Image (spheres, grey):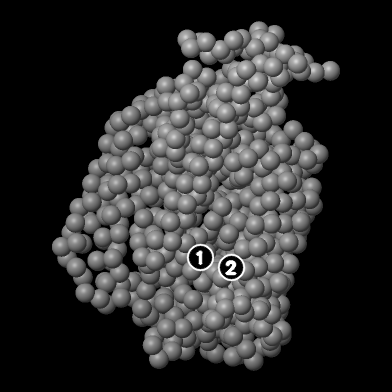
Amino acid sequence: MVKKTTFAPRTPSAPPQQSSSDSKPPDTGRISFLYRDSSLGADGNDPGPDESTEEDMPAAWSLSKALRVAISRRKPLEKILNEGLGEPLLDDSVVNRSSRMSRPSAMDDEDRLTFLDLLAIGIGGTIGSGVFVLTGDVQPVAGPSAVLSWLIAGGTCLLSAYSYMELSARIPTRGSCYIFCYATLKELAAVIGGVCLTLEYGISGAGIARSWSDKFSSLVKHNLDIQYGSTSELSVDFFAAFLQIACISVCLCKLELGKKVILVLTLLKVLLVIFLIIAGVAPALMSPSDYPNLFENFDTFFPEGVGGTITGSSLLFFGFIGFDEVCCMAARSENPSKTMPRAIAGTLIGAAALSACAQLSLSYLVDFSGNLDDDGEGGTNFEDAFDEKGWIAAKYIAAVGEVLLLPLVVLVSFMPQPELLAAMSEDSLIPSVFHEEDSNGVFRKGGLIAGSILVLITFAVPFEVLWDVISLGVILSFNLTNTSLIMLRCGNGGKKVSNKSVRNLAALLWIISAPGAYLTWLNYCDPMLNDGDVNWPLSIVGVCLLFLSCVTVYMIDKKRQKFNDITTESDIFMAPFVPYTPGFAIVLNFFLMAQFGLTDHIIFLVSIALCVGGYVTYKSLKHWNKRTRESFRYSKYGKEVKDNFGVCK
C-alpha cells in the first residue's frame, strides 16, 4: 500500500512543509538521501545561512558555493558518536559509554576485533618491507648505528601515534584521520584526509602487490610481467592483479575468516624475522673471533658519524607506515577505549624492536665497507648476505618466506579501505552504495567497487613515482591528525562551539612551520649531513620561522579553553603534553616532507586538487539534482502526478 503524503502549496514566503504525521521525507530513496545531506548546516548539525534550503532553492548552486560550504561545515562530535551507536541522539550520559560506541549492527560478538587481532593487523602491515628492504638500504648509510636509527625513527612516529591513540579511544568510529578531521577541522580537511588515507591503504597495497610480483619473478628467475610501452617501466602484471583479487576476496568475506588469516600470517612473519635475527646474531655470539666487534669504538659503531645515523633514521621512518591502519578498524573493535591505544603502542614497540634486532643481525653478516660501490652507494639484503656466507638453506628460507608472507601486507592494506569509504558515504560525500552492509556486517558492494579499481591499478600502473607520493600523503595525514587533537583538547572539546583564537593559531602553525622546516632542511641540515654548501641567509630565515612555531604552540597552550568534553572518561588514554607533543610532531613531519623532490610534491598536490575538485563537483551536481526534483514536484505536472498517484518522487 502506497502511503500518501500531503504537500503544502509552495509560496514565496515559506518553504514547503511535510505532513505532521510523517517526520521523514516522502521518498525513502534518492530524495531521502538528499534530505539527510541538506539537513547538515555550517556547524555540521543544523542548516546555516550558507546552506541550500527550500527557501533559497531558486538560487544557483555553484561550484564555488559548494566549496564554501565544505570549508565552513563541521560535524559535531556528539553527532558522530550517536551515529556510531546507531540510535537517535542521546544525552551525554549515554554518549560517554565509549565501550558501546560504533558497533555495526550485523556483527556478532565473536567477530569483533580483540587486542590480539588489532596487534596482528598492525604488526602484519608494518614489518616486512622494513626488515626485508630498508635494513639493507640503510646499512651503507649508517652502518651498525642504524640500530639506533630504527629507535629514533620509532620515537618520531610515537609523537604522532600519541594523537592516534587518544583520538581512536575518544572517537572509536570507522574513518581514522578522516573522521578526526570532520569533528575538528571541518569537511574540506576531512576530504583531504580521506584522500591521504586512500593513498596509504588502497594505492600502497596495489604497489606492494607489484613488489611481490617482482620478488616472485626473482625467485623463479623469470620475468612475469608484460611490457606495453617503449620503456621497461610500463608493463602489465597479471600475477600482481591475481594477488590483489585474492586479498580483496578474503577481506570481503566474514570478518572471522579475515582475522584468522591475518593472525596466522602475522605469526609466521614474526617467526621468519626471529629466524633472520638468530641466523646473524647467534654465530657472532658463539664465535666472536670470526666476526667484527661492532661496539669496539666510536668509529666502528658510527662509521659515517652521527650525521649518518640521523640520515638513516629519516629513511627508516617509512618502515613504520601502517601502524595507523588499526584506527580504521576501531568501529569493529572490542572495548575500543582500552584496546585501541594498546594496539597502536604495541604495534610501534613491536615493529621497532624486531626491526632494530634484524638490523643488528645484518650488521654482523655484512661488513659495512663491503656494501658500497664506486659511487659510495649501494645496499644489501638478507638473501645476498646469506649467499655470501654460503648459507644456501638460509638464503632460500628468507627468499621463499618473504614471497609467501608479503601478501599479508596487501591484505592488511585493503582491509581498512571499505571502512573508510563507508564513513565518507554515511556523510554523503560519496554515493550511498559504499555504506551498504550485508548480513555479515561487511561493506561488500563498496568493497567490490573499490577493489575493482585497485585491481586495475595493480594490473597496469607503474609505481616508480607513486611511492614517494604515497609517503607524502601519509605524512600529511599524520599532521592532520595531530592538528585534530590540538583542536579537540584546546579548541572546542568536541562541542559545536569553537575557540577562534586556537583555530587561527593552529592554522598559523602550519603556515610558518612548513616553510621553516623546508628552508632549514634544504639549506642547512641536508648540506651539513652530505658535505654540501650551507646557505646561511635562508637557513637563518628557516630557524627564525621554527622559533616562531614554538611561540605559536605556546600561545595555543595559553589560549586554550576549558570545555566539558563529552568523551572524557577517567580511564581513557590522554596524550601527554598537549599541545606541545602534537605541535612538535607537526614540525618534525614537515622536515620529513622536505626530503622529497619537487616533482613528488607537484604530483601529490595535483592529486589532492583533482580529488577535491571531484568531490566539489559531485556535491554541486547532487544538490542541483535535488533542486530539479523539487522544482518538478511543485510544478503543474508534478501536482498532476500527485493528484493521480498520491505521491510525487
Note whether 371 is above or below 251 in the view shown.
below
Q: In which quarter of the image is the N terminus?
A: top right
Note whether 45 is above or below 394 in the view shown.
above
- Label 2 with label 1: CB-CB less than 8 Å: yes
* Residue at image location 33% in from the left, 29% down from the top: 500
Tell me where residue 6 appears, x and y as whole percent: 68, 10
Front residue of 188 and 529? 188
Tell me where residue 316 appears, x and y as whole percent: 47, 66
Q: Is residue 263 left or right of residue 140?
A: right
**Residue, disc 1:** 466
Looking at the rendered structure, the number of numbered marks drawn on it comes to: 2
Q: Is residue 581 left or right of residue 277?
A: left
Q: Is residue 541 left or right of residue 351?
A: left
* Residue at image location 31% in from the left, 35% down from the top: 504
* Residue at image location 36% in from the left, 78% down from the top: 304
The kind of residue tagged 2 is Val
